[in-house]
Image (cartoon, rainbow, N blue to C red):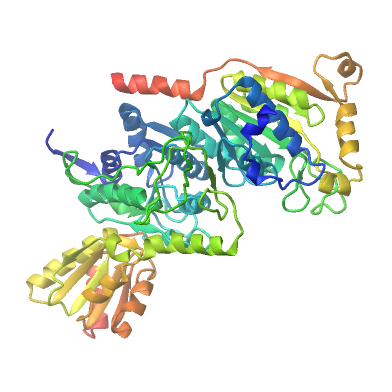
Amino acid sequence: MSSQICFVQGNEACVRGALYAGVRFFAGYPITPSTEIAEHLAEQLPRVGGKFVQMEDEIASMCAVCGASLAGFKAMTATSGPGFSLKQEALGYAIMAEIPCVVVDVQRGGPSTGLPTECSQGDLMQARWGAHGDHSIIALTASSIQDVFSTTVEAFNMAETYRTPVILLFDEVIGHMREKLEIPEQGVLPVVERLHTEVRAGVNYHPYLPREDGRLPMSDFGGVHRYNVTGLHHDIWGFPTQNADQVSKLNYHLYDKIENREHLLARWKEYYLDDAEQVIISYGSSARSCRQLVENRHHKGDRIGLLELQTLWPFPAKLVREKTARAKSIFVVEMNMGQLAAQVKPIVVNPDRVFRVNRVDGQLITPTDIGQVMRVIEGRGF
Amino acid sequence: MSIHRLIRQRFFPHLWCPGCGHGMILNALLHAVDELGIEQSQLCMVSGIGCSARISGYVDFHSMHTLHGRALAFATGLKLARPELKVFVPMGDGDAMAIGGNHFIHACRRNIDMVAIVMNNRIYGMTGGQYSPLSGRGIVATTAPYHSIDRDFDTVRLATGAGATFVARTTAFHVREISSLIKKAYEHKGFAVVEVLTQCPTYFGRKNKLGGPVQMLEWYRDNTAPLGSKKLAENPDLIPRGVFVDEEAPEYCSEYDSVIARAHKE
């Protein structure tokens, strides 16, 4: 079987990527602008022996995903802002109980019901801190249909590798836009399978005892090993504990397994950064407009480059610092009020030269919008 | 003594108060499992949050202690993924009927094969005695210091109305009946609800001056009667016990197999 070329929207590319990665369970609830993900999986999953269920609400969907993942299935759900808010409780459970799963948030305008059919990138901080308590999270994004596909595969890989939920933070434009997608042959992109324990039946299995490399082999819930899963702080058996040492150890484990791997988890694209004096940092659909602007101005001889982040969390601070080290000014372009800019500012060499370029009216930020803001900042007027 | 093999003895003593009915339900449940001869590694216990939810930690089955009210949603994902597993979902009254009410009615409607056990002591025990949707009018609780004005749900009627295909009720006084109803519920293919009226002497009993656990259990003995009994016919105000619904209907996981079959054809 050779690669397959199709013309699909982002939400469908996400489904194709998930199937490529081996998704076998989806639980969801209808919500614009992510619904097509559920629709396509309702059609596709039974064909590959998987299961699809439309639950009674967003909360239940996230819970069902946890249940199915523990049973050994690669599992995912998809939603948008209001549903993402509702999923935070069970998302926190998945973080605590170390349940691999993928949660897609096709962002729309907020707060609240906001702009159901318009684009936004306002959920960046919710993806990071939506669940209560100290924790860490992986969140990825993409700016093209091809990247939606490959990033979705990556999301499943990271979820399995680190036994954690991974957020795919797409946006309405990316979800609904149609572009060419080339689906590679199976085996071309790496796919990480569930790491199962080698502990045999009848021998003590510790579900929360990391190996030397930090990974925690799993035993399918309902399989040969009987163990406990809980959202409470727990010991290596999965049993609740309030022992201060064990509590502290677990908190650091959950945090460090992701934060200490910032360099391994960083995914990005860059354009003309080598000699750039002006560096634009962006992600998702905003990065498309940035790229257009950068291409145009680069061809006119401007020393301008683009750093497109695909990993948003853990925030790739080292990467951003390095890529902007020689920049005279940095423009953070996003469709919110500066949620990424707030991450960029404290970690760059010259925080005073970090400027925000935002649009928050539900419309896609354009190259003209970005150019205008840059002209004002550069003192060249409108 | 054979039921000892079914518990995780190192987690005892349990955290329930002296006189609590939850331990009696656990005892009845273990006897039911033992008599049914279910293989321990086939049985999954999925619970929510609260006093009742701790039951899952004490049993040596696969145990998932989840979120408040959400046990049925977790269990649905688990069961749908692996229909061969046997799933028990013990819940408290607040757990099942307040925060988990939506999940409860939809699990009934879906008719997915599992046994939901509602351990109804009419109070939030773990948080210290607040009224629940099953407390009823006139009940005193820490959040109803004068009296509760909230009308209560009837678990049996709610489950029946929502489409559960097996619905039963008993009390902590009737320990053998708990076992026999759990066995029937297990053998039923579809979503089965067993409500067990139980006592919380620490909060419900004390706040409402109902005496100790013995008096509370005696109240259940004296104020309930089996369905179809002469006692119930003569005293229609008593709380009926027994099997209210036991009907066949398409089970969700089996139905999904037909979806898979159709998807393969098209």
Question: Against A80, is A335 above or below?
Answer: below
Residue A307, picture quadrant:
bottom left
Question: Against B10, is A267 above or below?
Answer: below
Q: Quadrant of the C terminus of chain A?
A: bottom left
User: What residue do we see at 39% from left, 69% from top?
Assistant: A337
Q: Quadrant of the N terminus of chain A?
A: top left
Question: Against A323, is B123 above or below?
Answer: above
User: What residue do we see at 20% from left, 69% from top?
Assistant: A306
Residue B1, picture quadrant:
top right
Image coords of residue A76 (percent x, y): 39, 43
Question: Against B127, is A263 above or below?
Answer: below
User: What residue do we see at 44% from left, 63% from top?
Assistant: A255
User: What residue do we see at 16% from left, 75% from top?
Assistant: A304
* B183 vs A376, nearest the viewer: B183
- B251 sits to left or right of A37: right
* B248 vs A362, nearest the viewer: B248
- A263 sits to left or right of B75: left
Image coords of residue B249 (percent x, y): 56, 17
* B234 vs A111, nearest the viewer: B234
Q: Can you see residue B166?
A: no
Image coords of residue B34 (percent x, y): 64, 24
